[in-house]
Each structure stands twice: as C-alpha cells, then as structure tokens.
Amino acid sequence: MRLPAAKKELGQHFLVDENLLGVIGRLAELAPEDVVLEVGPGLGVLTTYLAERVAHVHAVELDRSLEPTLAERLEPHTNVDLHFGDALRLDLASLDPAPTKLVANLPYNIATPLVMESLDGLPAVGLWCVMIQREVADRFFAEPSTKAYGAVSVLVQLAAERTGFHPVSRTVFRPRPNVDSALVAFRRRALPAEFTHVKEMVVGAFAHRRKRLANSLELAGLAPRDHAASALEAIGRDPGARAEELTPPEFVALAVALR
C-alpha cells in the first residue's frame, strides 16, 4: 500500500524511525495493565508498539485519509480502538476503559491545548509521555523569571512533576520538521484545591505579561487592583510584582488570599 503524504495544515510529521520506540517505552514506563491514549497515530508505528505492550490503546486521529493505512496495520491488534475526530472536541473523558497514560507524538498545532485540557479533564491519566516541539517541552518546566515561563509552565508544574526528557532528532520524522523536538515525560501529582479557579487566575495573570500582576488581574476581571496588591503582600510578595516572578505554589497561595 502506498503510504499517504503528511498534511502540513494538520501539523503532521509522521514518526518513521522505530529506534525511538524503546526510549518512549522506557519514559512512559509501560506496563501490561496500562490503558493508553494516543493522539495523532499517523501511520501507526507507535500504535503498534503500544498495542503489543499494554492492555488497551485508544488512538485518536483527525485525518480520515489515514484510515485504510491504520486499519491494515492494526488489524492483528484487537486491543486498539480507533477514534476519528478532533481530539480537542471529542469527549475523551468518556473513553472506556479510561486512559491511564497519554503517550503520543502530538501534532504540533494541538500539543499545548491538549496537554492543558488533560490535566484536569482526564483525571485517570497519571503519566504523560509526549513528543512535542523542543520549545514547548522547555516551556512546560521553565523556571520563574525566564522568558519561557508562563501560564502553561505554572499549570503543568502544579499538576505534574517531570520524570524524563530526551531530545529527538529531526530525522525520525517524515517529512522532517523545521524545528527541534523532544520527548518529555511527567507524572501527575495531586491537583490543588479549586484548580479550575487557580487555572483561570493564572491565565489572567499572564494575559498582560509586561504589566504588574495586580493590574493584569484587574484587566482580566478577576480582582480589583488594590485587592490583588494586598493579596500579594499577604503571601510575602511585593505588591508591584509581575506574574513571571511567582512560583507555581505562590499562585495557589495567591488564589487562596484573593478568596
């Protein structure tokens, strides 16, 4: 069968080098009882590897033109469910059995929103092992007061701790991307109370990055400036601090102070 071409508009870069699969398996800590969610199976290289090692795989693919290729490749594996649709629109929380791990070569254009939604939207997922742009991987676990640090950094670090990192060569994909990639693995930790409220506040805090945090929260409609400044003082921060200066736990403390 002639293999389909990748679609640039869908951010497709198919994984074709099977030598990387062992690294993914190690970082994902695959076990026979795992139920894995894979978004963007592409040509099914990783899907096949997963199906041979775990109890069940949910593979979610947007591109219907890949269905014949995937169906043929995955026919021997009765423990794989193929779901066609937009992963950001499908009700992934209703998948049965519920995914316990998210292991995927994520399409570049949905990587960040998908991971962000899964933090609280897929509570059964306990470990992520995702191949993403190196820039995005660095952003997930960036330190405060750095250029890469932002709302995504805060929320990922509140929900999870990094357990693995592996730079990935451009040559493992077809077509080769114009950016560097990396595998990053992270394990869930207990979400802070009222994570939804904390999430809203963090997004608002970084919406106007160059402004003082108190001003940003007022502009986002989350707290009057004076109230936000007082809350910052209450957690031991300068009332004129900017969002990028606060650590993830300090954002939780700030949310409590604002309440």
Image (cartoon, rainbow, N blue to C red):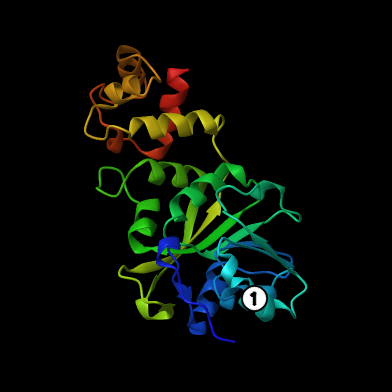
In this rendering, position of residue 53 left or right of residue 209: right
Q: Few, some or many C-alpha atoms within 10 Å of disc 1 (few <14, some 14-19, many ≥20)? A: some
- Nearest the camera: 67 or 191? 67
What residue is rendered at 37% in x and 30% in y? 204
**Residue beneath label 1, please?**
68
- Nearest the camera: 82 or 168? 82
Residue 51's spot in the image, x, y percent?
69, 74
In this rendering, position of residue 156 left or right of residue 45: left
The three-letter amino acid code for the residue at tag 1 is Pro
State the quadrant of the N terminus: bottom right
What residue is rendered at 65% in x and 63% in y? 36
The answer to whether one can see residue 169 in this image is no
Residue 124's spot in the image, x, y percent?
67, 49
What residue is rendered at 40% in x and 20% in y? 222
Quadrant location of residue 71?
bottom right
Residue 141's spot in the image, x, y percent?
38, 52
Q: Secondary structure at mark 1?
A: helix
The answer to whether one can see residue 235 in this image is yes
What residue is rendered at 60% in x and 43% in y? 121
